[in-house]
Image (spheres, rainbow, N blue to C red):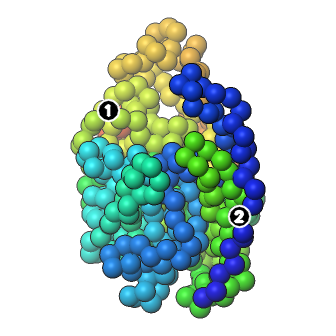
Amino acid sequence: MARTIPAVKTPLNATPLNVGIDGQPLYGLTYASEPLGFGWAQLDFGQKIGPHGRYTIERKLGWGTNSSTWLARDTMAQRFVAVKVTTSFATDMDRKNLVWEADALNAVSHLPLSPHCIRVLESHFTLPGKGLSGDNHLCFVTPVYGGDVESLWSAIEALPTPVAKRILLHLLRGIAHVHSRGFVHADIKMSNIFFDTVLSTHDIEKFLATDPPRRHDPENSPWGIMQSAVSQPLPMISSDQAQRANFLLGDLGCAQPSRLRDGSTANYVLYRAPEVWMNGEWDKPADIWAFGCLVRYTTGDWFMGKQLSSLPGAVRYFKNENGYSNFISDKEVVFEDDPFDYCIARVTNRFTDSQELEIGALMKRCLRLVPEDRATAEDLLTDAWFSDVAA
């Protein structure tokens, strides 16, 4: 298929701003996308990667802290796939057995599968890096997904309650699947909830023809001229399509084996369980706490309690011993001493009285201070609040 790729323009910031103490030039770096040269993979449109050059790169779908994701053509299976290409740092962490993404993906991809959890299509492979460093990049091949809930939220502005309930029920099924395979997800948030694409292979072909892959303007750097690919996700689904969509738990980059207890930090900062904040041991219940936070749709009023003061490291968070007041708020989170029911009432005012009771009861099952007191994902699947969700 013919591709239109912009010609290289005059590099931006081509003149060094200063000279460092080692005599090397210092540049004003204004990266328009991931900072290539700092470990992110540099891929070309039309490049063939993987075993026997099986996957042909078509466009970049997006990028994050530890990876970029690319739409590719599987020439053997005659279909489109997504290829997650990790940074050289993340790849090195895998080589040193300090991360478990490959193990977690393999575990959740064995039969029986769950439609509500990401899976790999083929075994992972390593892509040789470009540039002076020659760093390698670990790659995972997955189905093509339509996007993530954070982007959906931005596009629709306010998710209808039936859609939100559908997302949360499907997410819970994904969490249950990950837990059943012996792993903790440890990074539950909106941007890690995906939904299936509604596009067929033919639809994607037409989309690529009308909206070809593009690159940002060239930029100068200590590694030479860099020109990152523009992130071009697939078209967003509509609100009506969202009511019928299949949602799933994605991105197992932070997943850990259950009972590992290695002391690392779990979950997005605003959904982080109290035992994690206080350097206590954590496991699957940390995912349940994060899920309980997501039920509210937004972050804000959290109720903790005196039990926090007994956890290791609590002295770093409170100026006194009562576990309630004078919280040292340099960790981007606010703890309150309001009664839990009052906090729930303040964040459920969009619901009817009966709905408030149901959502409040669900949240209470998740946001219990003692991890062992929280419901499991399997238990929550039968919660009354989900009784009217179809499929």
Q: Using residue 15 as the reference point, say whether residue 203 is left or right of it.
A: left
Residue beneath the point at 63% across and 58% down: 227
What residue is rendered at 67% in x and 64% in y?
215
Vertical comparison of 40 with 277: above or below: below
Distance between mark 1 and mark 2 Cα atoms = 47 Å
Q: Residue at x 62, y 41 (%)?
A: 299
Residue 82 sits above or below residue 202 on the image? above
Q: Is residue 135 above or below residue 165?
A: above
Say the numbered circle drawn on residue 8: 2
Question: Where is the N terminus found, in terms of image quarters?
Answer: bottom right
Using the image as rendered, state which of residue 56 and residue 104 is in the foreground: 56
Residue placed under numbered mark 1 in the picture: 263
Which is more foreground, mark 1 or mark 2? 2
Q: Position of residue 58 (x, y in %)?
A: 56, 76
Residue furthest to the top: 320
Relative image position of residue 334 (x, y in whole percent): 60, 27
Residue 236, label in figure: none
Say which amino acid is labelled 2: Val
Compared across the picture, whether 132 is left or right of 204 comes to: left
Q: Residues within 10 Å of mark 1 (few under 14, many from 20)?
A: few
Query: Which of the two labelled residues, at mark 1 and mark 2, occupies the earlier sequence position?
Result: 2
Q: Is residue 312 visible?
A: yes
Query: Do the CB atoms of the residues marked 1 and 2 lie less than 8 Å apart?
Result: no
Q: Which type of secondary structure does the marked residue at label 1 adopt?
A: loop
Q: Is residue 209 left or right of residue 117?
A: right
Label 2: few (<14), some or many (≥20) within 10 Å? few
Pick whichever, 391 or 38, lies toward us. 38
Q: Is residue 356 visible?
A: no
Three-letter amino acid code of the residue under disc 1:
Gly
